[in-house]
Amino acid sequence: MNIHEYQAKELFRSYGVAVPSGVVVDSPEEARRLISEKSGIFSGSSAVYAVKAQIHAGGRGKAGGVKIAKSVSEIPGYVEALLGKTLVTHQTGPEGRLVRKVWIEEGAQIAREFYLSLVLDRSSRRISILASTEGGMEIEEVSAAHPEKILTLSVDPEMGCKSFVGRRVASFLGLPITLYGSFSTLLANLYRFFLDTDCMMVEINPLIQTGDGRLLALDAKVSFDDNALYRQEKILALRDLFEENELEIEASKHRLNYVKLDGSIACMVNGAGLAMATMDVIALAGGTPANFLDVGGGASKETVEQAFRILLGDPEVKGIFVNIFGGIVRCERIAGGIIAAAKDVKLHVPLVVRLQGTNAKEGREMLRESGLDLQVAEELFEGAQKIVQAVKGAK
């Protein structure tokens, strides 16, 4: 789950990470009222303000989603220009994201910019720290052009983020020795925040050194582990459904792991690894997967029915490939669930089902005798070829 920049900064502040003061507004009138009342950040003497569109995507600056106001009189105009605008960045896709809120914060005197992030490294089962002297740039670009300017450190979970880790990163970034202590504290606080709230990724780009020698998180991007949200009520309350795909929201209600993609062949699979392999094989057969969908190990009739409804809710879907391995649940039970669900939802696109595992032969026979307009496959690539051909033939 992702959250907005202004929400992430409030969380940072609660963990002792310095961020610029700001206010969030959803109308130009609200901005004008705060300015006229000299409320919050407008009660000080700041001469420069950053006006930022709030969407769950990076690259806002390049897309025109960040404006610099050199006086308070410019702020309402920038707010009005951003609200209701659809921002298209490299992370939103061509459809873009609609701006519903704007964050206004005090400007800062920037001496240097850095990149800093903490990410969950599944391969090492540790939290990794990434740091770079090239703050304000896309880290992918830095990695491609100047990999030597990126430091990656894996934190030993038994030791935690000790001060020597902070000093190592501070040294790499070229911070003055006088800032080693404050940087180590900042990094330790971020690490504690990461653990406490079940994060997947925390990114500050840029982290700045101000003209008066302070460290300030000028931006904040945070994502959380969906599987841990049941124990993170305060984090879950920050969820913005407007920023999520409607089908993905519906899938989450039924505990289905669904991610919409841009293709035309929908996939229904039990197991994340098998789902990834299925998408690859569809592409190898000449098709384009429309989604990632893991229905889990049970794959009951109710689960399959909800999955069908979600897949058919995507108007781009031209065919469905069901690829199930019967391990925990026998294949004839899965076949019965598919037959019942397919009849209930009234399928109107080609359907190919591939079953393997316990009692797979019996399950395939049930499907063939069901009277449904579907094809049965035994091998994975065979099934992928059948659905690709069926979709092409249906055009």
Image (cartoon, rainbow, N blue to C red):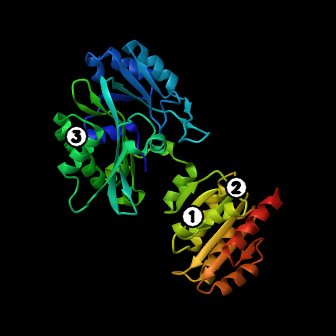
- Amino acid at pointer 1: Met
How much space separates mark 3 and mark 1, taking CA atoms? 40 Å
- Left of 156 or right of it: where is 325? right
**Which tag is nearer the camera, tag 2 or tag 1?**
1
| Residue 291 picture quarter | bottom right
Q: Does label 2 or label 1 sit earlier along the sequence?
A: 2
- Residue 149: percent from left, percent from top: 38, 42
Crowd tier of the residue under label 1, counting other residues whose Cα lies within 10 Å: few below 14, some 14–19, many 20 or above: some
- Amino acid at pointer 2: Ser
- Amino acid at pointer 3: Phe
Q: Name the residue under label 2.
A: 264
Secondary element at image label 2:
loop
| Residue drawn at the location 65% of the way across and 56% of the way down | 290
Placement of 199 over or under 277, stated as above or below: above
Q: Name the residue under label 1.
A: 276
Q: Does label 3 or label 1 sit earlier along the sequence?
A: 3
Crowd tier of the residue under label 3, counting other residues whose Cα lies within 10 Å: few below 14, some 14–19, many 20 or above: many
- Residue 371: percent from left, percent from top: 78, 77
Total count of labels: 3
| Residue 311 picture quarter | bottom right
- Residue 362: percent from left, percent from top: 67, 87
How much space separates mark 2 and mark 1, taking CA atoms? 16 Å
* Camera-side residue of 379 and 25: 379
Crowd tier of the residue under label 2, counting other residues whose Cα lies within 10 Å: few below 14, some 14–19, many 20 or above: many
Q: Does label 2 or label 3 sit earlier along the sequence?
A: 3
Check whether the beta carbons of the residues at disc 2 and disc 3 lie within 8 A of each other: no
| Residue drawn at the location 28% of the way across and 55% of the way down | 195
Q: Name the residue under label 3.
A: 183
